[in-house]
Image (cartoon, grey):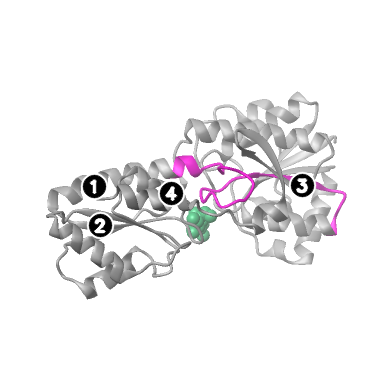
Amino acid sequence: MNKIAVFTSGGDAPGMNACIRAVVRAAIHYGIEVMGIRRGYKGMINDDFIPMAATSVSYILHKGGTILGSARSDEFRTPEGRKKAYDNLKKHGIDGIVAIGGDGTFTGANIFMQEYPDIAIVGTPGTIDNDLYGTDFTIGYDTAINTAMEAIDKIKDTADAHDRLFFVEVMGRDVGFIAARSGIAAGAKAILIPESKTDIDDLVLQLLNNAAKKKLSNIVVVAEGDDEGGAMEIAQKVKQRTNLFDIRVTVLGHMQRGGSPTCMDRVLASRVGVAAVQALKDGKKGIMLGQLHREVSEIPFEKAIKHHKKMSTALEELSKIIAY
Ligand code: F6P
């Protein structure tokens, strides 16, 4: 392996910069030339490549977002788009790639490698959603849950002052990992996630039981992909059943994607970034480097994206036991 490239793709996540830095510094450490590709697959198609030196990644470890930019590319879904990308990679003499991203990123990488097996791609898990199989946590998840928790803490103050019921929506189109952990950490009364069926009548009953105990102020955390809808819709459904509560809705949105990464995210990103370069150097491809039970893990892309990680039922049970 003489020359590699690194890119970030899909939804950005805090810690992506720490991962870019680790990839660049590890490549240089092993005597491998390294380039950055700006805006993911889009930049690969549009020939947006930049040389990277050790100093190109100085002072980015603590920054959110990604210095390489990110995108979701429709053109890369077409054979013509992938051909353009391949030609550009060849032009720059690149034989290995580290892709930092999630589901969509690794799906694209797999298709590309079937068509162009002479380019080796490995990945690192970059998404706040934590929905990749084969890694305990993804880069950005820890920062996102801390951001959500701090926001809910603040909402709790005002909810309590006015005896209000708040529905707080957090990110998670297909999974409830952010909702589950931030909800437990911030003491939510209920946590509604896509993985389990939401029963509005049952929720109203719980809230009325609380009201009977003179507790009108409550927080319900809703994952954006819940089967009964987002926080706004669920609040409406509750209002249709009872007018006892003074209800407010807060959608946290993209603030969960930004901000300085936590220590956990920086260390995870650094670790898997180095492991990705080592994997390429050892002739490996088609795998995601994650972290399982405190050790670096290697998971085929196919497994990482298809066997969607399951939410621990223990977390759901726990939140029900301690909520009041
Ligand atoms: O994949 C991360 C994520 O933040 C999801 O939780 C969310 O549903 C989605 O991206 C939003 O994506 P965007 O606004 O970038 O299209």
N-terminal label among 3 and 2: 3
Whether the residue under disc 3 has CB within 8 Å of ligand 1: no
Q: How many marks?
A: 4
For residue 167, what is the image quadrant?
bottom left
Q: Which residue is tagged 3?
A: 121
Image: magenta residue range:
115-144
| Vertical placement of residue 57 versus 45, above or below | above
Element marked by disc 4 = helix
Report the side of 145 relative to 214 (left or right): right
N-terminal label among 4 and 2: 2
Element marked by disc 1 = helix
**Measured Cα–Cα span from mark 3 to mark 2:** 45 Å
Q: Which residue is tagged 2?
A: 166
Q: Is residue 139 visible?
A: yes
Q: Which residue is tagged 1?
A: 156
| Vertical placement of residue 299 versus 80, above or below | above
Asked whether the residues under the numbered discs 1 and 2 touch, taking CB atoms below 8 Å apart as contact, a structural biologist would say: yes
**x and y, in percent, of residue 46 in the image:** 71, 54
Where residue 315 is drawn, which disc sits there? 4
N-terminal label among 1 and 2: 1
* Crowd tier of the residue under label 1, counting other residues whose Cα lies within 10 Å: few below 14, some 14–19, many 20 or above: many
Report the side of 125 relative to 250 (left or right): right
* Crowd tier of the residue under label 3, counting other residues whose Cα lies within 10 Å: few below 14, some 14–19, many 20 or above: many
Q: Is residue 52 visible?
A: no
Q: Nearer the viewer, mark 3 or mark 1?
A: 1
The type of residue carrying mark 4 is Leu
Q: Nearer the viewer, residue 124 or 175?
A: 175
**Measured Cα–Cα span from mark 3 to mark 1:** 45 Å
The type of residue carrying mark 2 is Phe
